[in-house]
Image (tube, rainbow, N blue to C red):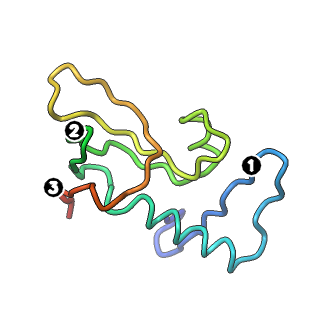
Amino acid sequence: MSDRIGRTSRITPAPMPGQRAVSDPDTAEALRRVVAQQVGPRRPGTVYRNIDGAFRVLDVTVDATEARRILGRRAAQFAITVIDVLRPDAQPFSIGSVWTGSDRLIQAVA
C-alpha cells in the first residue's frame, strides 16, 4: 500500500476489543502475509467462481478496523465487496470469506 509515490506504508492490524495493538514488526508482518493469503488473488476487477456463484470484486479492504465496521464482525481482518455477475438485478455486498481450493479465478486483472 502506498501513501506517497515511492514510499510504502505497512498496515498494522487493529486489535480486537480488549486486545492490545500488534507492536512487534515481525508479528505484524506475519499477520499481513496471512491476510494476503486469505484474500488470495481477489483484486478489484477480478472475477471468480465458487459454489455460491460468480462474482466480480469491486473493492478489497485490508484495514482491520474498517473491515470490522463493514462486516459487523469483531475479528474481521479484511472485507471484500463483490457483485454477483450471474444476476442482472444483483446488488453489491461485502464478504469476509477466505480464498479456498474450491474458488476458481475466471478473469484476472493485469
Total tally of numbered discs in the picture: 3
Q: Are marks 1 and 2 in contact (CB under 8 Å)?
A: no
- Which label sits in the foreground, 3 or 2? 2
Residue 105 coordinates in the image, percent (x, y): 20, 58
Is disc 2 placed on a helix, strand or loop? strand
Q: Name the residue carrying label 1.
A: 16
85 lies above or below 11: above
Q: Which mark is residue 53?
A: 2
Q: Quadrant of residue 31?
A: bottom right
Q: Residue at x 38, y 45 (%)?
A: 59
Residue 26 coordinates in the image, percent (x, y): 68, 80
Q: Residue at x 58, y 69 (%)?
A: 9
Distance between mark 1 and mark 2 Cα atoms: 31 Å
Q: Nearer the viewer, residue 3 or 108?
A: 108
Is disc 3 placed on a helix, strand or loop? strand
Callout 2 amino acid: Gly
Left or right, 44 with reference to 72: left
Left or right, 32 with reference to 103: right
Residues packed near mark 2 inside 10 Å, few (<14), some (14 to 19) or many (20 plus): few
Residue 100 coordinates in the image, percent (x, y): 35, 59
- Quick one: label 3 or label 2, which is nearer the N terminus? 2
Distance between mark 3 and mark 1 Cα atoms: 34 Å
Q: Residue at x 74, y 49 (%)?
A: 16
Is disc 1 placed on a helix, strand or loop? loop
Residue 88 coordinates in the image, percent (x, y): 15, 23
Residues packed near mark 3 inside 10 Å, few (<14), some (14 to 19) or many (20 plus): few
Q: Name the residue carrying label 3.
A: 107
27 lies above or below 14: below
Callout 3 amino acid: Gln
The quarter of the image holding the C terminus is: bottom left
Callout 1 amino acid: Met
Q: Are marks 3 and 1 in contact (CB under 8 Å)?
A: no
